[in-house]
Image: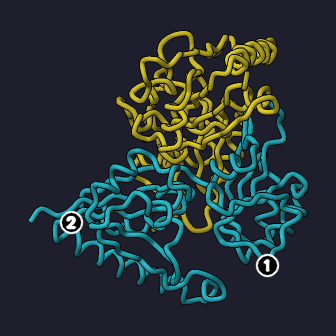
Chain colours: A yellow, B cyan
Amino acid sequence: MTPGRLSGVGVGPGDPELLTLKALRLIQEADVIAYPVAKRGDGVALSAARPHLRPDQQLLPLVYPITASPEADLPSYPEVMRAFYDRSADEIASLLDAGRNVCVLCEGDPFFYGSFIYWHARLNDRYETTVTPGVSSVMAGPVALGRPLCLRKDTVTVIPGTLPPEELTRRLAAADAAVVMKLGRTFGKVRAALEAAGALDRAFYVERASQAGERTMRAAEVDPASVPYFSIVVVPSRETP
Amino acid sequence: MTPGRLSGVGVGPGDPELLTLKALRLIQEADVIAYPVAKRGDGVALSAARPHLRPDQQLLPLVYPITASPEADLPSYPEVMRAFYDRSADEIASLLDAGRNVCVLCEGDPFFYGSFIYWHARLNDRYETTVTPGVSSVMAGPVALGRPLCLRKDTVTVIPGTLPPEELTRRLAAADAAVVMKLGRTFGKVRAALEAAGALDRAFYVERASQAGERTMRAAEVDPASVPYFSIVVVPSRETP
């Protein structure tokens, strides 16, 4: 039997209208729609794709074993995640071996901090694979704010909020424009680093960019207890157009 | 008369299939399609949108007065460009005043080094304006290479090739993963900076990502004389999935 084709498809920041035409085509051509998800709910990737699915398509949730601290801080975290990626890659491989085309949905872009990176590394050599880029929250966040991110000779630094406080401060102080991702429980630390770097007064917070419930405010005004993981901080350029 | 609506639409890196559904809708709803362009040819933005246009839509080329060195190095450059943005914003405003909806096409993403930033600043307060994010070459370049850009705790730095040599070197040396944009005549300097930063051996060159004629190779193997402005260098993560 001819094996199925694997595709990793960026579905954008959440608005189903921010899928690309290519993402839509690959989703529609797939027999199986695989999607990473936390224990509860559809997750952002499936929610973005859901309006475009057909009832006859098989859904394959790839359920993260760990999605939040404190578990993510345990020494066993890398091993637990590796076992998860191995096991879920095997599930995808069985479907491909059965001749079914599998489309893995990726919030934002597959190769930009995407979980697809781990499935790609495990399956790319064995199956015909296409990767389709998507709109990242790096692009959607500034649009939600109505503020350009960068122009002219600006550098832009994208920084995971999970870095140590002193590295966060150093990176933020060196950046012309910046986006901080992977927030949630890290927000208090990120806020302190923004302040130490002298960037708090020009930093904005964006929650659920492009989705229903999108919220933006100055980073200084955010309640750290209310910050979901998939929100970002945007520090736009100091330049004026 | 009710003024028309202005939209700035990211059309992605060049493949017409990498338009989002929202970009497609706004293009189709527009009476006038405005697009920045060099003196010759359609330019990347119009080429990406062209398959989706209707014959009855008015095309408004916004022709850059300066597109390449040595002119771009002259002291008069900022003034010439300011006059261009003023004049072309007036052209767009006349159409909006006449009740026509104007869609400005933007290669990649409008707020990520986009020329739309300058028209937005001049028109946003006076007209109903929507901005639609797009797929950037920061996402399309790694996909063209088949290599993830960043994972885990990587920072990503996006660097204009127009920076001075020592700043290029410093930024590249500090980055976990990097994308260098605005190449062309700057490539020789960028290559030297990659070498000085110890990043040349893991740096890749991507030309016309997602378009017909897409080319990728190791940055070390590129002929500097052959590099178009809209090509990029990608320095992927050192991490392995």
Left or right: A185 with respect to B174? left
B95 above or below A51? below
Q: Position of residue B159 (x, y in %)?
A: 69, 60
Q: Residue at x 45, y 80 (%)?
A: B63
> Where is mark 1, residue-wise?
B225
Foreground of the two, A199 or B219 = B219
Left or right: B22 with respect to A71? left
Residue B100 - label? 2
Q: Position of residue A222 (x, y in %)?
A: 45, 32
Type of the residue with mark 1: Ala
**Which residue extends farthest front?**
A1
Q: Residue at x 29, y 77 (%)?
A: B90
User: Label 1's element?
Assistant: helix
Image quadrant assignment for residue A165: top right
Residue A195 - label? none
User: Could you tell me if residue A164 is visible in this image?
Assistant: no
Mark 2 neighbour class, 10 Å CA radius: few under 14, some 14 to 19, many 20 or more: some
Same-subunit check for callouts 1 and 2:
yes
Q: Residue at x 16, y 71 (%)?
A: B98
Q: Residue at x 56, y 48 (%)?
A: A199
User: Label 2's element?
Assistant: loop
B124 above or below B139? below
**Which residue extends farthest left?**
B1
Instruction: Specify the subunit that label 2 lies on.
Output: B
Could you tell which of marks 1 and 2 lies nearer the N-terminus? 2
Instruction: Specify the subunit that label 1 lies on.
Output: B
Mark 1 neighbour class, 10 Å CA radius: few under 14, some 14 to 19, many 20 or more: few
